[in-house]
Image: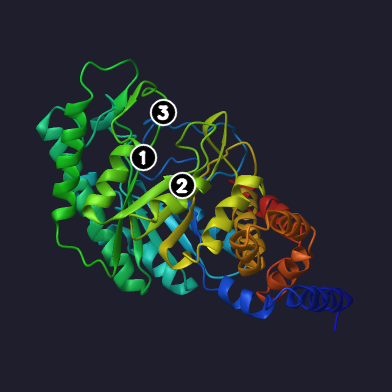
Amino acid sequence: MPDKQKMIESSYEQAKVLYAKRGVDTDRVLDELAKIRVSINCWQGDDVRGFEGAEELTGGIQVTGSYPGAARNPEELRQDLEKALSLIPGKHKVNIHAMYAETKGVKVDRNELKPEHFQNWVDWAKRLGIGLDFNPTYFSHPLSDDGFTLSHQDPKIRRFWIEHGIACRRIGAYFGRELGIPCVTNIWVPDGYKDLPADRFAPRRRLMESLDQILAADIDPEHNIDAVESKLFGIGSESYVVGSNEFYLGYAVKNKITLCLDAGHFHPTEMISDKISAVLTYVDRLLLHVSRPVRWDSDHVVTFDDELQRIMEEIVRGKVADRVFIALDFFDGSINRIAAWAIGTRNTLKALLKAMLEPGEILKEYEAKGDFTSRLALMEELKAYPWPAVWDYYCLRHNVPVRDEWLAEVKVYEQEVLLKR
């Protein structure tokens, strides 16, 4: 047995004993962690370009940086994703947008998309044993140029986007049925005004009516899970966004669908970790878009920061892992894109593991007794517990690189593949 493997296993056994003294079974925790599928965003790999030939990215979204090696076609994007997945422990999902359809050179507008235009994605996912999530693409299109889609004043334009939403729900159901893993189809629209509007009500009424028509289509909820996503502001919609948090929270509660909370879609001082328990009091399921805003919704690569840890602690402490879908949403063109996937996803899993290793019942017992001193003391001491030894063992068990060994693989891939594009 190699010395490195012996060292990892020995460190794990020591950590296992220490956690057991607090009533935590690390073997059981690792089994539970392996059941959780993180949805990895495909658009990190090509800077949100898609395969439609759009010349610019619109909808209040920006990608900065020009690091070499961005995927130029479906084959390269899937190849890069597959490399990233080989660096991440566990079986997960890949999240794709409608603009990643493959139409074999034939012009197919978004309201005419069908499952067949994503067959290559399904075949690829089957081969890897992963799931797929889906998103209608309400940006980077001529009929979204004025900043409005589902809430547009023009009924013809509105109808186009309604048909797009219905088509996407059918595609999502196809993903779920073919892969045996439910697909979360998430609706986000960029609709809003740059300056103060004279009428805030009418666009929201139109958005509500459009969503009603999209969701009226008979789609099997066992295969497709509908979600709606809010935003505080965007570039070009700084003063008013039609789909605000309050709008979608009310809509999700009324219509019993999933609400999406994006970490970057609120005021910089608002944290979605505090919203999880509040929202799940009223809705059955929650979709999280885990990202890292810096000053605004800049979608930086997820780092192992306090808010990421608090998000995962809320999921674990509330015992709601079966009601929460964890998805990533970041895009950074200034660094190696495979590395971005690996960093963001591994950090998400690390934070989730650390939360799962917490003796939550003991902390809750202290709290119920009013022993806030013991609660705080144990919370602080747990920060120094050897959870990294458990993480290393988890990576070893799943045959993926331990610690920063994954970076060497990325550097080789960069030289052999990315720099030759």
**Residue 130: horizontal and vertical position, in percent?**
46, 69
Q: Residue at x 59, y 34 (%)?
A: 66
Element type where label 3 sits in the image: loop
Upstream in the sequence, badge 2 or badge 1? 1
**Residue 116: horizontal and vertical position, in percent?**
26, 62
**Residue 229: horizontal and vertical position, in percent?**
35, 44
Closer to us: 61 or 289: 289
Toward the front, the furthest residue is 369
Locate residue 342: give its quadrant: bottom right
Amino acid beneath label 2: Lys
Closer to us: 124 or 400: 400
Closer to us: 158 or 127: 158
What label does residue 275 carry, if any? 2
Measured in 3D between alpha carbons, the distance from the residue under mark 3 to the one under mark 2, in whole angstroms, is 21 Å
Amino acid beneath label 1: Ser
Residue 38, placed above or below residue 292 = below
Q: How is the image coloured?
A: rainbow
Measured in 3D between alpha carbons, the distance from the residue under mark 2 to the one under mark 1, in whole angstroms, is 13 Å
What label does residue 234 carry, if any? 3
Toward the left, the furthest residue is 155
Disc 2 versus disc 1: nearer the observer = 2
10 Å neighbourhood of mark 3: few (<14), some, or many (≥20)?
many
